Image (cartoon, helix red, strand yellow):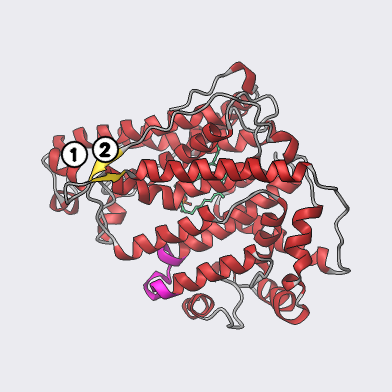
Amino acid sequence: MSAALTGVVVSPNSEVCSGLGFLETTRVVDPSRLLAKEKGFFRSERFKNAGRKQRCYSYFGELGFLGSRKLDVVSRVVASSSGNLAISSEQLVYDVVLKQAALVKEQMRSREDMEVKPDIVLPGTLGLLNEAYDRCGEVCAEYAKTFYLGTLLMTPERRKAIWAIYVWCRRTDELVDGPNASHITPKALDRWESRLEDLFNGRPFDMLDAALSDTVSKFPVDIQPFKDMIDGMRMDLRKSRYDNFDELYLYCYYVAGTVGLMSVPIMGIDRDSLATTESVYNAALALGIANQLTNILRDVGEDARRGRVYLPQDELAKAGLSDEDIFAMKVTDKWRVFMKKQIKRARTFFDQAEEGVTQLSSASRWPVWASLLLYRQILDEIEANDYNNFTRRAYVSKPKKIVALPLAYAKSLVPPSSRKLVPN
Ligand SMILES: CC(C)=CCC/C(C)=C/CC/C(C)=C/CC/C(C)=C/[C@@H]1[C@@H](COP(=O)(O)OP(=O)(O)O)[C@]1(C)CC/C=C(\C)CC/C=C(\C)CCC=C(C)C
């Protein structure tokens, strides 16, 4: 598996087509070779460019950005180490949110004028594409069962697109977090990025890329959050400490906030939503940040064993704590006080995100509510473990999951018009 993963990333021309060891079955590798290399189908311009023009799905209607309320763009500045004023990570990321929202609005406007023609499907290729999506679904079902079940409620087009994005994110994350992480170099990430650009240009490298390539040709998805996620992996390679929350926030955006931004154009916004596009993107970003902060708080011990501390160093110091205390893995009163503050902050991001879930198209709400409620409960479990996140892994038990799912369903029935989205 190690050789295979390195082969893919280090050498895009390699015959090894799967980017992840766990995807390496002959079933995956062979058809993708056939697709990308022998038939050359996925290199066809039709796949991307003509596809973009000709396909028009119901999500246009559902991205009903009727809201007129403007978000206040607060200029948030922080003092840099040299004493100069610098733009904060929050502001930097918010600029991406604004750009994504503007892009999606722009794409919708230009698509409205388009003549919708039926897809031209080359004989034999649709089956291969369906197979590619099915494989993405299988990976999703294997690695994120509850979330996979949630996606089954979505429309078939959206469900397949979310699976394709999930698989790309998983593969990207596995580059630095998986069993082959020690082989990954910045150069390898550069190659992964150029492969990403290729798939956005209709030239997927393998079968799983082909599914995403098809997705980005159908939905108004921008490449930037994908590139930013790769930047997050670069950050993970070179950095194992975060001086303050501003630095940590940027990392959380890269590795998880980006997922929110990638997902909104697929999930769509409800026609009846009065929220602005920006505010929905902002809520999606908040959910990614909340999830990642929760993930970090849950995995403090595990990360420490790898020599990593994803906690703001200045806040640790203020609490009278240091890396040594973390490596000692002792739950002390100082640690409890520190953790309470971190948990409070993560909950604030979940609260912000909740406002946005109701604005999503009705069929997309349930999986998002489910993932939000389940992930949020991890924070309760850390508390229940008396803040011992060094040697005990907080997890949500099966019975609790079973209770959360109908609750998520009930929440997903609340229509957007009955709730107002308050911009932050
Ligand atoms: C419905 C839904 C949740 C859709 C998102 C699907 C999707 C594309 C997921 C990709 C997740 C992924 C593999 C990300 C790679 C980086 C990473 C590992 C991030 C961490 C996730 C947890 O992963 P992991 O499997 O390691 O966790 P466990 O150890 O098993 O617990 C993250 C913590 C971040 C995940 C971030 C999200 C799922 C973002 C969610 C935001 C939205 C879906 C936007 C919703 C819209 C509004 C308006 C709120």
What's the mark number on residue 16? Answer: none
Q: Which residues are magenta?
A: 175-187
- The image position of residue 301, as x and y in percent, is 27, 51
Q: Residues within 10 Å of mark 1 (few under 14, many from 20)?
A: some
Amino acid residing under circle 2: Tyr
Residue on which the image places disc 1: 335
At a point 30% along the width and 65% down the height, the residue shown is: 238
At a point 61% along the width and 25% down the height, the residue shown is: 67
- The image position of residue 99, as x and y in percent, is 53, 45
Q: Nearer the viewer, mark 2 or mark 1?
A: 1
- Residue 419 forms part of the magenta stretch: no
Q: Give the structural element (helix, strand or loop) at label 2.
A: loop
Left or right? Give the position of 373 relative to 263.
Answer: left
- The image position of residue 87, as x and y in percent, is 32, 44
Distance from the alpha carbon under mark 2 to that under mark 1: 8 Å
Q: Residues within 10 Å of mark 2 (few under 14, many from 20)?
A: many
Residue on which the image places disc 2: 387
